[in-house]
Image: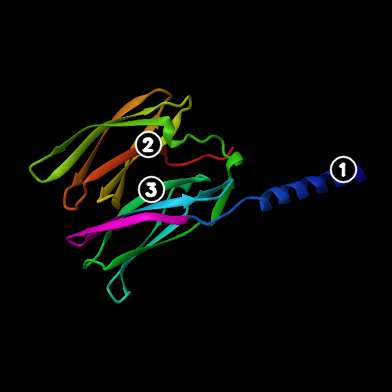
Amino acid sequence: MKKFLCLILSLILVSCNNAGSLDRQELKIGSHGASYYDGVLRYGVVLKNDSENAVSMKPVIKVYAKDEKGQIIASATHYANYVLPQDHTYFGDRLKCAKKPDHVDFEVKTKKWSALNDLKRVIKRDSFDVKMKSRVNDDEDHNYYRGTITNKSRYYANDVEVVLIFKKNKKIVFVSKVDIGALKADETKAFTTIMDSHFEYDAVSFYGEVKNVEKA
């Protein structure tokens, strides 16, 4: 009985030590930017995770549009998907704003962290091959982006999305996402996304990712 209790105590101590060794470093705000047109603010931001082994799960992103005096004229709160250790992700959205802000600030906070080796499996960005086939502009000044995404991994990928990063003079002005659904190993799906051209950009890049990671 005494040996059994010692064993339980040892396991508890190991568990506590492992939990305490999780390298939780709050995400950093990387490159970011915005574009404003007709009461709508579009924005994009890079979220960086410098942790060695901690996955940021559902980090909270707060966006503040401010006037020249630093007063908040519009704000929003979002939840990103996750950010792997020693990695980054892009996030963006739209926000109604009565006037063009002088600047836009971002804050990020992670309430839940997970050890990388506690996840069931991780399908990284380089497991997806995204190809943009065409861009067509219609009579109403909408840009139709058409492309394909292929799951090159050997895993079934659920809740896949394509991330599009729009830039002007090499600075982010908007990040948009397209839901793809599930992709079997080696499966390819076509996608189409519609963007209005009422914000200026001169470059667009894209990648594929899984929206959620699973615990083992």
Residue type at mark 1 is: Phe
Q: Is residue 183 visible?
A: yes
Q: Is residue 70 left or right of residue 4?
A: left
Residue furthest left in the image: 139
Q: State how far apart marks 1 and 2 are (Cα).
A: 49 Å
Q: How is the image coloured?
A: rainbow
| 1 or 2: tag closer to the N-terminus | 1
Q: Callout 2: few (<14), some (14-19), or many (20+) C-alpha neighbours within 10 Å?
A: many
Between marks 1 and 2 in the image, the one whose residue lies nearer the viewer:
2
Q: Secondary structure at mark 3?
A: strand
Of residues 87 and 39, the one drawn nearer to the viewer in this rendering: 87
Of residues 183 and 67, the one drawn nearer to the viewer in this rendering: 67
Q: Secondary structure at mark 2?
A: strand
The spot of residue 24 in percent (x, y) is 58, 54
Q: Are marks 2 and 3 in contact (CB under 8 Å)?
A: no
Report the magenta residues as a range: 28-43
Residue furthest top in the image: 186
Q: Which residue bears the numbered disc 3? A: 90
Residue type at mark 3 is: Tyr
Q: Quadrant of residue 33?
A: bottom left
Q: Which residue bears the numbered disc 2? A: 208
Q: Is residue 39 magenta?
A: yes
